[in-house]
């Protein structure tokens, strides 16, 4: 939906290895977001971006970094993966951001397992 | 740290209206009320949003009380495919951030 793809869709990795998740959009929206979802916690915002090279932290940003060098791509990096980062990661885009209403569209998710 | 309160679960009979309540007593004047739902394993899906007035679209209706401290999402004729977790969120001009709480798990039964 809304031209959002995430890659990879599934990944298993080992503790201590770097991992990069990619979110790609085709509709040139300014705002993009990374969330994680764990049982009992709902969705929690990790980082978000309000433009190329403009990013900010969410509520659970420790251990994660992001980059946005192009409008269409928002990368989430785990510099040294830990088992606590095993989760489902969702990317989202917003059609309007912080000007008034904010309707977000979500990607299909990436299931990451850190052993 | 969600600013909304929802019942953890509800049941609804297929074909009946599903009325999902949400309390947001600390809502600010510039904050919107949003509803999303998440069907098992999928990404959340936007349903509807409102500021002061009641809203209706092809999926649902949103009724906001006059003091804006609570709202109700109405699915007029629930189907089995409406079984999902429904999230009520309030958000204003804060970089577009949405804070998801635990939501209401709606089970539509035949």
Image (spheres, coloured by chain):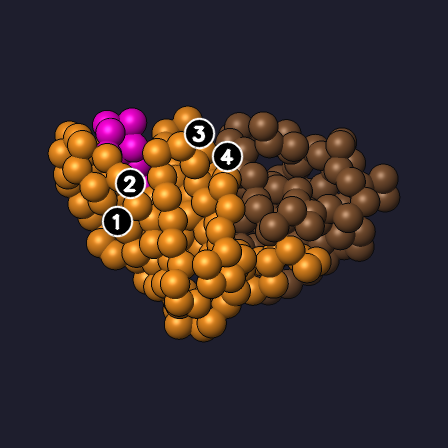
Provide the residue designation for mark 4: A59
Q: Quadrant of the N terminus of chain B?
A: top right
Task: Give me the chain letter of mark 1.
Answer: A
Does the CB distance between marks 2 and 4 fall below 8 Å?
no
Residue A77, quarter of the rendered image: top left
Q: Position of residue B55 (x, y in %)?
A: 72, 58
Q: Position of residue A75 (x, y in %)?
A: 34, 54
> Color used for chain A?
orange
Question: Mark 3: which secondary structure?
Answer: loop
Chain ID, brown in image: B
Does the CB distance between marks 1 and 2 fall below 8 Å?
yes
The residue positioned farthest toward the right in the image shown: B66
The residue positioned farthest toward the bottom in the image shown: A27
Give the CA distance from mark 2 to mark 4. Answer: 16 Å
Kindly identify the residue that appears in the image at 46 percent across and 45 percent down.
A47
Which mark identifies residue A41? 3
Upstream in the sequence, badge 1 or badge 4? 1
- Residue toward you, B52 or B78: B52
Q: Are marks 1 and 4 on the same chain?
A: yes
Q: Position of residue B38 (x, y in %)?
A: 44, 46
Kindly identify the residue that appears in the image at 51 percent across and 46 percent down.
A56
A15 relative to A1, above or below: above
Residue B41 visible at all? no
Q: What is the magenta range?
A: A81-88
Upstream in the sequence, badge 4 or badge 3? 3
Upstream in the sequence, badge 2 or badge 3? 3
B78 relative to B59, above or below: above
Is A8 contained in the magenta span? Answer: no
Provide the residue designation for mark 2: A78
Report whether A9 appears left or right of A89. left
Task: Give me the chain letter of mark 3.
Answer: A
Provide the residue designation for mark 1: A20
């Amino acid at each position: 939906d809304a031209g959002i793809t995430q890659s990879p869709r599934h990944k298993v990795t080992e503790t201590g290895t770097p991992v990069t998740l990619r979110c790609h959009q085709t509709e040139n929206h300014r705002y993009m977001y990374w969330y994680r979802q764990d049982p009992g916690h709902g969705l929690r915002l990790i980082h978000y971006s309000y433009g190329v090279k403009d990013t900010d932290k969410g509520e659970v940003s420790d251990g994660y970094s992001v980059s946005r060098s192009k409008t269409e791509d928002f990368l989430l990096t785990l510099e040294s993966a830990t088992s606590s980062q095993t989760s489902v990661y969702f990317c989202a885009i917003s059609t309007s951001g912080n000007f008034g209403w904010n309707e977000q569209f979500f990607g299909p998710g990436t299931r990451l397992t850190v052993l | 740290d969600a600013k909304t309160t929802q019942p953890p679960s509800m049941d609804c009979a297929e074909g009946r209206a599903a009325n999902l309540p949400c309390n947001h007593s600390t809502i600010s004047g510039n904050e919107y009320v949003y509803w999303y739902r998440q069907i098992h394993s999928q990404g959340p899906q936007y349903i509807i949003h409102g500021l002061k007035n009641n809203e209706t679209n092809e999926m649902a209706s949103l009724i906001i009380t006059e003091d804006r401290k609570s709202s109700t999402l109405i699915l007029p004729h629930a189907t089995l495919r409406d079984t999902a977790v429904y999230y009520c969120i309030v958000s204003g001009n804060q970089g577009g951030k949405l804070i998801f709480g635990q939501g209401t798990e709606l089970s539509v039964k035949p």
